[in-house]
Image: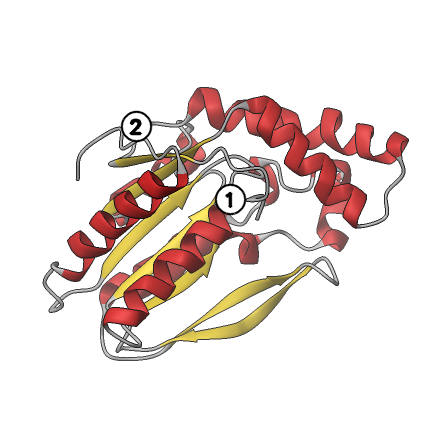
Amino acid sequence: MANGIGLEPRAETDAALDRLVRDLLARPRERRTVVAVAGAPGSGKSTLAETLKARLDAAAPGLSQVLPMDGFHYDDQLLEARGWRPRKGAPFTFDIDGLASALDRLRRDDGREVAVPVFDRALEIARAGARLIGAEARLVIVEGNYLLLDDPAWAGLRQRFDVTVRLDVPLPTLEARLRARWAGFGYDEAAIHAKLEENDLPNARLVATRSVAADVVVANTGPDEAR
């Protein structure tokens, strides 16, 4: 993969994603390929992962599955006990070893289904075994904030990825998207300000300044791509 594929405007975004899809479809299927999609909160990771899956499925139904990092959130009960609840979503609030174990099972590629957790945003909890990734899924798209974080706790994940993609979004765009997200959940201005300044924006700055280089960089600057 070539570094630094800039994707602006939308027509160029679609063309670049088409190139990525072609590259992934051309990969040998004897062994499973794991693709990491990383980026700050509000950068559009989930949207990109699902778009990528849809394009892959259009060419080869069932070839890909998505594994969201958010399924490895620590539970609120544990976060409360450790005083971490206000920082939910920060790097230390995830079960990194659990994610590594799931990736190892997927890379083992032994023909068995792998059950993975999925985060339920309506209830703010991770549901264990909520998604099954079967042997037919030769491409697994992992999406999350910190997959490329240059931090000892997270660095061990990188050897488990075959292709890496990073979403690059200006901080003002991220802030506008995140503000709209919390407003959509009914938060008032004081609560939105607290969410942004005490958690979301520090996490976004961390991802922007301390992520390692990716194979593909996507400049995702549209106003409505906050997932």
Q: Which residue is mark 2?
A: 213
| Disc marking residue 144 | none
Residue name at image x 76 percent, y 34 percent: 195
Residue 153 in the image, given as x and y percentages of width and height: 44, 35
Residue 72 in the image, given as x and y percentages of width and height: 54, 55
| Disc marking residue 44 | 1
Considering the image in quadrants, where does the N terminus appear? top left
Q: Amino acid at mark 2?
A: Ala
Residue 152 in the image, given as x and y percentages of width and height: 40, 30
Foreground: disc 1 or disc 2: 1
- Give the crowd class for mark 1: few <14, some 14-19, many >=20 residues within 10 Å: many
Residue name at image x 41 percent, y 62 percent: 66
**Left or right of 80 on screen, residue 55:** left
Quarter of image, res 62: bottom left
Q: Nearer the viewer, residue 47 or 15?
A: 15
**Left or right of 177 on screen, residue 168:** left
Q: Nearer the viewer, residue 131 or 56?
A: 56
Distance from disc 1 to disc 2, alpha carbons, whole Å, reads: 18 Å
Q: Are marks 1 and 2 in contact (CB under 8 Å)?
A: no
Residue name at image x 68 percent, y 59 percent: 121
Q: Nearer the viewer, residue 106 or 171?
A: 171
**Left or right of 147 on screen, residue 30:** left
Q: Amino acid at mark 1?
A: Gly
